[in-house]
Image: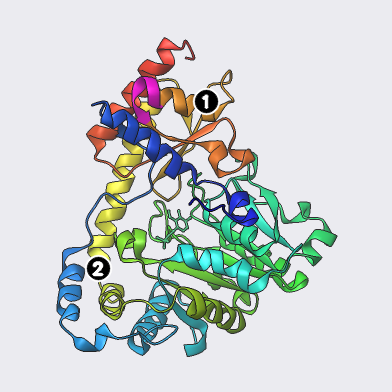
Amino acid sequence: MDFKASNRLVAVGDKYLAVQQEQIKKLQQQGISIINLGRGNPDQPTFPDIVEKAKHELDNPITHGYPPYGGNAELKSVIREFYQNEYGVVLAENEVTVLSGSTAALTAFPMALANVGDFVLTPTPAFFGYHIGITMSGAKSWPMLLSEENNYLPDLHAIPTDVAQKSPLMFLNYPHNPTGAGATRKFFDEVTAFGLKNKIAIVHDFAYADISFDHQAPSFLQSARAKETGVEIYTMSKAFNMAGWRVAFAVGNASIIKLLKTYIQNSVGGTFGAVQNASAYALQGQGEQRQQLRELYLDRRNAVIQALNQIGLSATHSSGTFFIWVKLPNSKTDDKAFAKELLDQAHVAVVPGSAFGDAGQGYIRISLVAPVDVLLNGVTKIGQFLHRQTLV
Ligand SMILES: Cc1ncc(COP(=O)(O)O)c(C=O)c1O
């Protein structure tokens, strides 16, 4: 017997990468090898001493039971030290909670804070993760347009007052997936003032906190009074190559943290103790390895941007993340058709910009999670494809 999805699940729709993965599988089954520049999965292994620590923790029977809700006391205390050392942000015990990855938390926020018919202020283009909780909660997304002219920062003045009044929640994400744009302290100060004025819970998704090239990416919580109106989500997935371990944390406003914890403890539950202990270990060191990882992505970014320019494509110089946002030649605005043809004919997978929202139309996103020779081979094939299509 086949069962039907609920109306809200139908409204969520299929994740673009899952659909593309199926298309890739079909081509691979025909013996075709694909250069995948679509996925955002770090290609490097977790730093070895974190793995060793986790192996050791697996033998510790204390880690085998249900973990305490909201995280182990030791990890929470290490997170507070980490934020103080990295960003100069002082956090109280009730301003921290541990999560099994940030994806579940991003879904949890609208479920915990929004009601049917409310607006959630959401950037477009943006990571797919925000839209799921918004749709499942019965709230509606209010798109905040990010454009090249605005350095991919939303214009807060463009949000109508009646919309702001009906918005319990705003999502932000810098360094930004998919454009690679960074935020400034000044921008976060404006966001804080906006959140305080309109009583909006700001959720800053800081997934690429550590992958910032020219300077350290600012934390939203560095703005004075930011903690009165918002939280920040920090994942171990990218900075420590721990995407498969499913561990992240939220820090900031105590009442938002409490609501998040209530929802998470009743849905996802706790995070495996051995993973928490290995994360506490990771957050207390790894400075050199984190720096090497940043340099690896920087080298890849520079090589790929140069190669893209050589094939006649203009790419935005990313300030962080492991993504490059590429504008398609003028005659090509149907980025979904472009990505499909590129996969079928040149055997290169990229994500079409409109998969991140309508504002991404006319762009593609290239991921830097492959060795340089693979990345450059992919760009060469894109160049040959464009040439065949007489697009450049
Ligand atoms: C902007 C952004 N937020 C969150 C996530 C998910 O992170 P996690 O592995 O913690 O679920 C991703 C993953 O690609 C991302 O790009």
Q: Position of residue 1 (x, y in %)?
A: 48, 52
The residue carrying pointer 2 sits among few (fewer than 14), some (14 to 19) or many (20 or more) residues within 10 Å by Cα, namely some
Left or right for 187, reference 268:
right
Q: Position of residue 214 (x, y in %)?
A: 41, 51
Left or right for 355, reference 322:
right
Q: What secondary structure predominates along the stretch shown in magenta?
A: helix
Residue at the spot of label 2: 286
Q: Is there a contact, CB below 8 Å, between mark 2 and mark 1? A: no
Residue in view at x 38 percent, y 82 percent: 81
Report the span colored magenta: 343-348
- Which circle marks residue 337 in the picture? 1
Whether 313 is drawn above or below 207: the answer is above
Would you say the beta carbon of the disc 2 residue lies within 8 angstroms of ligand 1?
no
* Element type where label 2 sits in the image: loop
Q: Where in the image, quadrant-wise, is ligand 1 located?
A: bottom left
Disc 2/disc 1 C-alpha distance (Å):
42 Å
* Element type where label 1 sits in the image: helix
Query: Which colour scheme appears in the figure?
Result: rainbow
Residue in view at x 63 percent, y 50 percent: 11
Q: Is residue 68 visible?
A: yes
Q: Nearer the viewer, residue 206 or 21?
A: 21
Residue 96 belongs to magenta span: no
Of circles 2 and 1, the one toward us is: 1
Which amino acid does the dot numbered 1 rest on? Ala
Which amino acid does the dot numbered 2 rest on? Gln
